[in-house]
Amino acid sequence: MLPAETLDQITRRFAFLEARLNEGASPAEIAELSREYTELRPVVAEIAAWRQAGTDLAEAEAMLADPEMRALAEDEIPQLKARIPEMEARLRIALLPKDAADARPAILEIRPGTGGEEAALFAGDLLRMYQRHAEAQGWDFQLLEYAATELGGVKEAMARIAGEGVFARLKYESGVHRVQRVPETESGGRIHTSAATVAVLPEAAEVDIDIPASDIRIDTMRASGAGGQHVNTTDSAVRITHIPTGIIVTSSEKSQHQNRANAMAVLRARLYDAERARADAARAADRKSQVGSGDRSERIRTYNFPQGRMTDHRINLTLYALGQIMEGDLGAIIDALVAQDQAEKLAAMEGQG
């Protein structure tokens, strides 16, 4: 059974937020209250629906004693008994603790791993895959940094993706992505294996991560691109070094002002991600989640082009739809990862209960 007191606390809190917003709070308070109100609204709707179904079942069972209503009750009772467990399962998922970063925009970082030029070409394929997925979701995709190889692969790419539920959906993409295919540069038709790393970080606000000016060194330099393309004749590229950690971030778009803002945004995201990782490790030292762990060194997925299949090793999911996946159709994969993550969290909560 779901704890009635917990459900009552949530509904009371929601009623308080609704009343406070209607009273007219300060702009800063409205922003904070609205965020919590928006998070609680679907939970309260699930609570109300589940409780109403329970009331309907009790009323239908009482109607069995009335000869005139008995046939109607006998029709309704099986339907309600079938629906209530499904509603309770949805409510349990809605009650799972939320990741505070789920509603944030994401910083996507892609780099080639083992495999030389083929790895760089695959990194470029992954970048296009995520861009197409973002466009299909109606998310905003902004390229922050892009360094290309001579053959058009990616040395390094960073993008900011903003929209509803971006980090909540994309956070499962962090890790090593492996590709098996015949490279364009291979004349013998042999299948090669190479890899690229993907990191998805929640965007951090200035209030989350305070970076004293004394902790960073900012250098400007001349931007350049592959094969002499996009060469900037002014010192507009920016490199920021975070002295305490040694993290280095660069941005080389046309505007030095925008480069500085981009680089600071990426630096904040990396420091925020590191802080979240430390906190997660402290909370769950005795349990490692198999999904969404964010371990950059973990091989999470294989893309096999000759067989047209994609396998996600964390959940043993294989799909023979590689063409659609590379075009950005990631919905089925992400839905499966979300479901597995929720199942693990539910099991952990029940184990603690």
Image (spheres, rainbow, N blue to C red):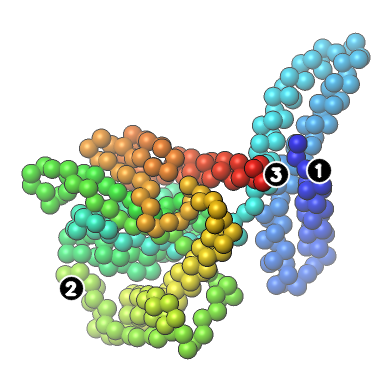
Identity of the residue drawn at 73% across and 19% down: 78
Q: Is residue 274 above or below residue 116?
A: below
In whole angstroms, how far apart are the C-alphas of marks 1 and 3? 15 Å
* Marks 2 and 3, how far apart at CA: 62 Å
Q: Which residue is mark 2?
A: 228
Q: Looking at the image, which is closer to me, 343 or 48?
A: 343
Q: What residue would you read off at disc 1?
A: 4
> Three-letter amino acid code at disc 1?
Ala
**Other-residue count near label 3 (Cα within 10 Å), few / some / many at <14 / 14–19 / ≥20:** few
| Residue closest to the eye, 294 or 87 | 294
Q: Is residue 59 visible?
A: yes
SS class of the residue under badge 2? helix
From the top left corner, tell me how far across and down residue 206 is, in percent.
55, 76
Mark 2 or mark 3, earlier in chain: 2
Establish if 103 lies above or below 258.
above
Of labels 2 and 3, the one closer to you: 3
The numbered dot on residue 353 is 3
Determine the secondary structure under disc 1.
helix
Tag 2: residue type?
Gly
The answer to which quarter of the image holds residue 234 is: bottom left
Residue flagged by tag 3: what amino acid is it?
Answer: Gly
